[in-house]
Image (cartoon, helix red, strand yellow):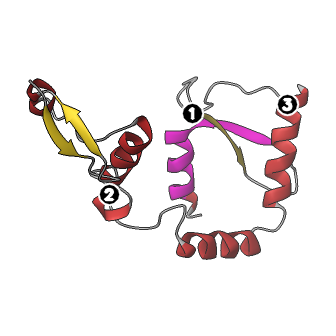
């Protein structure tokens, strides 16, 4: 036994078995419509996201403004970051464990002074965040 329904995206006629409908299937006529339907149900950006804590998001204009201000206050930062990336890729600089806690996961290069581009302290993400909270930057 099949039931005739309309696709929720393009309104084409589809046939679905009752057991599929009970499982939440049988709503779309094709893979394209199924993907569109899934994306429409996954709008969890910003405040709709269960992990939302308020504040600035990366695609927010406010973030871009803050980043621009930070780069103005820290001349040489961008060049220093690029220099470290290039040195790691070429093998001149080797990523080490966190110098604070010894972790080997998600290691960042922390600059105390952007003029010395390759003079970095290796910190895990957690310790790097703590360092910036202590320094106030």
Does 130 lie within the magenta span?
Answer: yes
Residue on which disc 3 sits: 89
**Position of residue 44 in the picture relative to residue 107 (left or right):** left
In-image side of 62 versus 119 (left or right): left
- For marks 1 and 2 on the same chain, the one whose residue lies earlier in the sequence: 2
Real-space CA distance between mark 2 and mark 3, rounded to the nearest whole angstrom: 35 Å
Mark number displayed over residue 52: 2
Q: Secondary structure at mark 1?
A: loop
Q: Are marks 1 and 3 in contact (CB under 8 Å)?
A: no
Q: Is residue 64 left or right of residue 9?
A: right
Most common SS among magenta residues: helix
| Residue denoted by label 1 | 100
Front-lying residue, 20 or 89: 20
Q: Is residue 110 visible?
A: yes
Q: Please provide the residue range marked out in magenta.
A: 119-134
Q: Earlier in the sequence, mark 2 or mark 3?
A: 2
Question: 82 or 136, which is in the foreground?
Answer: 82
């Amino acid at each position: 036994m099949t039931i005739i329904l309309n696709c929720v995206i393009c309104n084409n006629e589809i046939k679905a078995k009752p057991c599929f409908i009970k499982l939440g299937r049988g709503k779309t006529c094709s893979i394209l419509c199924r993907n569109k339907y899934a994306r429409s149900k996954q709008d969890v950006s910003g405040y709709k996201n269960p992990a939302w804590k308020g504040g600035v998001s990366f695609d927010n204009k406010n973030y871009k403004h803050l980043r621009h201000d930070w780069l103005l206050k820290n001349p040489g930062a961008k060049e220093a970051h690029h220099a470290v990336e290039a040195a790691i890729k070429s093998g001149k600089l080797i990523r080490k464990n966190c110098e604070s806690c010894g972790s080997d996961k998600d290691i960042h290069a922390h600059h105390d002074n952007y003029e010395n581009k390759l003079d970095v302290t290796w910190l895990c993400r957690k310790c790097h965040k703590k360092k910036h909270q202590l320094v106030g930057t």
